[in-house]
Amino acid sequence: MLIAKTKKELREILSKQEKKKIGFVPTMGALHSGHLSLIEKANDENDFTIVSVFVNPKQFNNQEDLEKYPEDLNGDIEKIETIADCLFCPSTEDIYPSDYQEKYFELEQFEEVMEGKHRGGHFQGVCNIVYLLFELIHPTHAYFGIKDYQQLAIIQHISKKHFSKIKIVACEIVREKNGLAKSSRNQNLSKDQFQKASFIYQSLLKAKKLAGNNLSTNDISSIIESDFKQNHFELEYFEISDHITLLPLSKPTVKSRAFIAAYLGKVRLIDNMELIE
Ligand code: AMP
């Protein structure tokens, strides 16, 4: 596996690249089997697979969250060296030189709901880094997890306008044995919190069952919110939204999704699930 630590080094690698299909998997590192499923898929579907590991400060709206974000570059290299052709692991200074001009992206309603509403500026930060990486790499395929469903919808939205040639590939959520969606932030949970966190998944399954019983969004939300209260578990939001527009629905429809953001101590976790297949 080739390793590029600067944009210049990556450009050099890419200039020698004659392979047709380039698969790209952007990550923030501390890789787990959720990330690896994206990288394996990219490896299967392309001639050359590039993985980026970059903890993007612009997408953190909380300084403490950024400081506590886990990093393990050597472990990451070991995990991907047989399934990726190139690792791009730049420094913040290389990505955002002092004269970097932050771009503004028109994200319409996508930025006004859920993660956009609760994490001011988060998606502008995500779009800045993805735009920069897509411009640098020009992959044929780019892989994103359904775990971050709203992020995926936003990347699809900006790609339609700026990168119509890049195929955005959506990848299934990989879970722990207890149902908790794999996340780098899970490393910051205690053993006890880790067990407790499966409650998020159980709640999504319950919402799915209630949607199947024809309940309205209000009714489902009241049940889920009261479950969280009873379990002394801090729910930031529970929403039922259209799978394309992400706007809230008064009643679950086919393919609509339930979304949860919740805190266990200081660790913020998100998850989502399709309600009616
Ligand atoms: P991150 O390093 O958290 O920015 O994630 C990098 C990519 O991996 C994003 O497209 C995520 O949606 C995806 N991802 C993270 N966790 C999972 C998971 N449990 N299952 C599938 N994809 C995931």
Image: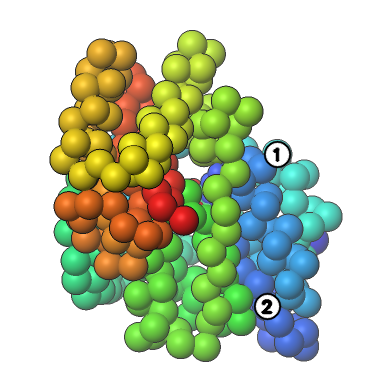
Q: What's the coloring here? A: rainbow
Asked if the beta carbon under badge 1 is closer than 8 A to the nearest atom of ligand 1, the reply is: no
Q: Which mark is residue 245?
A: none
Residue 114: percent from the left, percent from the top?
Answer: 24, 49
Q: Which residue is mark 2?
A: 22
Q: Secondary structure at mark 2?
A: strand
Up-down relation of residue 184 to residue 199 (above or below) = below
The residue to which callout 1 is attached is 75
Q: Residues within 10 Å of mark 1 (few under 14, many from 20)?
A: few
Q: Tell me how many marks there are.
A: 2
In percent of width and height, residue 141 lies at 60, 76
Which numbered mark, 2 or 1, is in the foreground of this view?
Answer: 2
- State the quadrant of the N terminus: bottom right
Judge from the rendering whether residue 69 lies leftward or rightward of residue 72; answer left or right. Answer: left
- Residue placed at 75% from the left, 65% from the top? 43
SS at mark 1? Answer: helix
Up/down of 76 relative to 27, above or below: above
Q: Nearer the N terminus, badge 2 or badge 1? A: 2
Q: Residue at x 42, y 24 (%)?
A: 199
Q: Is residue 12 visible from the viewing direction of this image?
A: no
- Residue depicted at 63% across the width and 28% down the height: 177
Residue 141 visible in the snapshot: yes
Kind of residue at badge 1: Gly
Q: Quadrant of residue 86?
A: bottom right
Q: Position of residue 208 (x, y in %)?
A: 39, 41
* Amino acid under disc 2: Ile
Viewer-nearest residue: 34 or 84:
34
